[in-house]
Image (cartoon, rainbow, N blue to C red):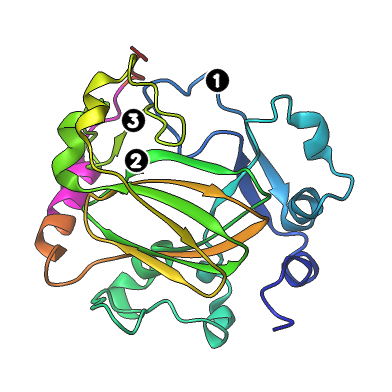
Amino acid sequence: KHRWTFEWFGAKFGSETMPCSDLAPFFRECDRGNIRTVQASVKEFVDYVVGRPSAFQALQTDESRVYYANGWAPFFNHEELLADVSDRLYCVQDTVPRDGPTKALNASLTKIFMGPAGTVSRLHHDTFATHVWLSQIRGRKQFICYPPEDTKHLHSFPVDEYDGRTSLFDPSKPDFEAFPKARQAQAYSVVVEEGETVILPTRWWHWAKSLTPSITLMRNFVNDTNMEEHFAIRNRAEEAKAKGPGQCG
């Protein structure tokens, strides 16, 4: 139990840098010019998470916009972490091989999320038609989820070339005047405790908030139910030309 703590990450990976943002995930329709993202060392961010003096105290100008490190994929360079945890969950099929031509893809599908209490993942569903599981290594996190059939009720931005969708509707503080169709959506709420895992199939919407300082192991995965669609989307995305930013409405 002495491993995979905030202090352990700070000591072992202290000089390694990772992206940290005050809005997550990135909404390309309206975050340009609004989101603040910095590259910080793991040690600097751990100091912020546990409440020690850190540059992030000066960077954070709004208590509702807590910095979140949700883009760290250390398994590219630190395969030894798999001696502590698995990138496979025993109860689901996961068919992307760890080695061979898909080695880099496999490593990119597993990330570590880290942040203090109050970090929020805004309402979205994941890209490339992947399933996802999220395990709480440290701390507690609330998830509010919606099934794919509620997409039409969630006032989402148009689907992007990666098959990702996002919405500015906040299910923790529902504003039904601004988002009237959301009244018809069926929300499912769960608090995931330390040592527990939540599993969400393809295109399940989710919003999440850390109730305490939190470390989450996240894995997007592919199996027989979504593999063909996943690689079709991935191939289209690789061929697509970059598009300009959208507008918030």
Looking at the picture, does residue 64 appear above or below residue 50? above
In the rendered image, residue 239 lying in the magenta stretch gets the answer yes
- Farthest-out residue, bottom: 83
The mark closer to the camera, 3 or 1, is: 3
Q: Quadrant of residue 152?
A: top left
Secondary structure of residue under mark 2: strand
Q: Residue at x 34, y 15 (%)?
A: 178
- Give whichever of discs 3 and 1 has the lower sequence position: 1
The mark closer to the camera, 1 or 2, is: 2
Q: Give the range drawn in magenta.
A: 232-243
Q: Which residue is drawn at 18% across and 39% down?
A: 150
Q: Mark 3 points at which residue?
A: 167
In the image, is 243 to the left or to the right of 228? Answer: right
- Badge number at residue 34: 1
Between the C-alphas of marks 3 and 2, the distance is 6 Å
Q: Name the residue under label 2.
A: 124
Horizontal and vertical percent position of residue 95: 23, 77
Q: Which residue is drawn at 33% across and 61% down?
A: 132
- Give whichever of discs 3 and 2 has the lower sequence position: 2
Looking at the picture, does residue 171 appear above or below residue 114? above
Secondary structure of residue under mark 3: loop
Q: Quadrant of residue 66?
A: top right
Which residue type does callout 3 highlight?
Answer: Ser
Q: Which class describes the residues within 10 Å of circle 3: few (<14), some (14-19), or many (20+)?
A: some
Image quadrant holding the C terminus, namely: top left
- Badge number at residue 134: none
Which residue type does callout 2 highlight?
Answer: His
In the image, is 64 to the left or to the right of 9? Answer: left
- Give whichever of discs 1 and 2 has the lower sequence position: 1
Secondary structure of residue under mark 1: loop
